[in-house]
Image: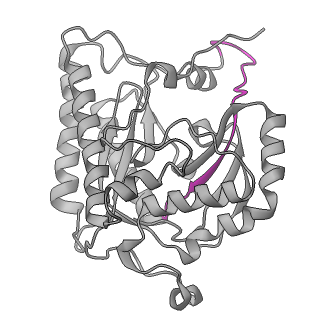
């Protein structure tokens, strides 16, 4: 019998730090939109508040005098080091809708990964081809049969969901590193009038003239609300682990305490993240002259990736990839 392992989610619960209270029984993404009076600037402010508060909270944990240890993922540890438990398999099956980063966002992520690796050589980095943003998690930690049944129930709606971003284009801006004791990610904010930076869609972009949304009034949070609604309308119950104002792509995780064992090492790690974030804010945000692009219109190059399987760490398989622009 294999080991009984505890997911990092148990020790590292992702809380909503925006201050928005969800209303039982309704689409959970409506609450934030209503709290912000459907104003993109206010939606961005709440995403920013969550990101700032969480980074501050996690900074304090890294630098605390009673710091104990990192939260190392036992599943990933065994997958990356098969000698720990030969024959180990991750059996946590899931179903999600992923956004896939376009090439310019992957280039930005790679630059940041290299900077982080310089600060902590033993970190585990997410391979670029596995990077994703979880627009909606339908179900997690189920059996393969349960996920297959969910997929079949949703099947008639999958084409429309996968290509939903073709006509509903939500822009993400202002990337920063978010981090905690288990992982680190590149997080974005919903756009609110910032200058456009992304490369133009690949021509011919026939959907541009027929888009159902215009500008930043349709935010990433609206997109999440709408795909939740499409799943519900298809008769599927959405069972996400959390609904928080966060738009992030995991950059990596920790598999050893080697880089963070001493207060000096942890200080160096925190300082490195803050230095990179200062560079992003000063040199990349809203800067058309930057060598890397700090903007992502979800659906650029690829539509939503309807995904099933053992999805942690970018695994699993695609049911359908929607049309990009």
**Res 325 seen here:** no
Task: State which region is magenta.
Answer: 83-102
Q: Position of 71 compared to 292: left or right?
A: right
**Res 169 seen here:** yes
Q: Quadrant of the C terminus?
A: bottom right
Q: Residue at x 31, y 37 (%)?
A: 17
Q: Position of 21 compared to 242: left or right?
A: left
Q: Residue 148, how many percent across, how many down?
A: 82, 43
| Figure quadrant of residue 258 | top left
197 shown above or below 248: below
59 shown above or below 23: above
Q: Position of 167 compared to 297: left or right?
A: right
Residue 97 located within the stretch drawn in magenta = yes
Q: Residue 120, how many percent across, how many down?
A: 32, 29
Comparing 145 with 218, the one in front is 218
Q: Residue at x 45, y 57 (%)?
A: 106
Q: Residue 196, how many percent across, how many down?
A: 31, 76
Residue 172 located within the stretch drawn in magenta = no
Q: Position of 137 compared to 190: left or right?
A: right
Give the prevailing secondary structure in the magenta stretch. loop
| Figure quadrant of residue 20 | top left
70 shown above or below 136: above
Q: Quadrant of the N terminus?
A: top right
């Amino acid at each position: 019998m294999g080991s009984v392992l505890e997911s990092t989610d148990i020790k590292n619960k992702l809380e909503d730090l925006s201050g928005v209270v969800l209303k039982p029984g309704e689409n959970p993404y409506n609450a934030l939109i209503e709290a912000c009076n459907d104003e993109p600037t206010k939606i961005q402010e709440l995403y920013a508040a969550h990101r700032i508060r969480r980074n501050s909270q996690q900074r304090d944990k890294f630098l605390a005098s009673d710091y104990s240890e990192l939260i190392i993922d036992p599943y990933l540890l065994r997958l990356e080091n098969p000698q720990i438990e030969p024959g180990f398999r991750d059996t946590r099956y899931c179903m999600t809708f992923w956004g896939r980063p376009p090439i310019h966002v992957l280039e930005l992520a790679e630059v940041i990964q290299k900077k982080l690796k310089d600060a902590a050589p033993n970190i585990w980095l997410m391979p670029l081809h596995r990077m994703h943003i979880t627009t909606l998690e339908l179900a997690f930690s189920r059996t393969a049969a349960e996920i297959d049944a969910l997929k079949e129930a949703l099947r008639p709606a999958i084409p429309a969901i996968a290509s939903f971003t073709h006509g509903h284009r939500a822009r993400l801006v202002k990337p920063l590193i978010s981090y905690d004791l288990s992982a680190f990610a590149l997080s974005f904010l919903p756009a609110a009038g910032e200058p456009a930076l992304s490369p133009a869609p690949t021509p011919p972009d026939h959907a541009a003239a027929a888009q159902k949304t215009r500008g930043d009034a349709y935010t990433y949070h609206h997109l999440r609300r709408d795909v939740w609604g499409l799943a519900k309308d298809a008769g599927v119950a959405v069972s996400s682990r959390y609904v928080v104002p966060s738009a992030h792509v995991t950059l990596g995780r920790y598999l050893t305490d080697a880089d963070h064992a001493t207060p000096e090492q942890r200080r160096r790690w925190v300082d490195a993240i803050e230095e990179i974030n200062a560079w992003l804010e000063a040199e990349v945000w809203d800067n058309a002259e930057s060598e890397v692009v700090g903007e992502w219109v979800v659906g650029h190059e690829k539509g939503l990736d309807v995904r099933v399987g053992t999805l942690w760490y970018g695994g699993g398989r695609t049911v359908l990839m929607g049309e990009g622009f």
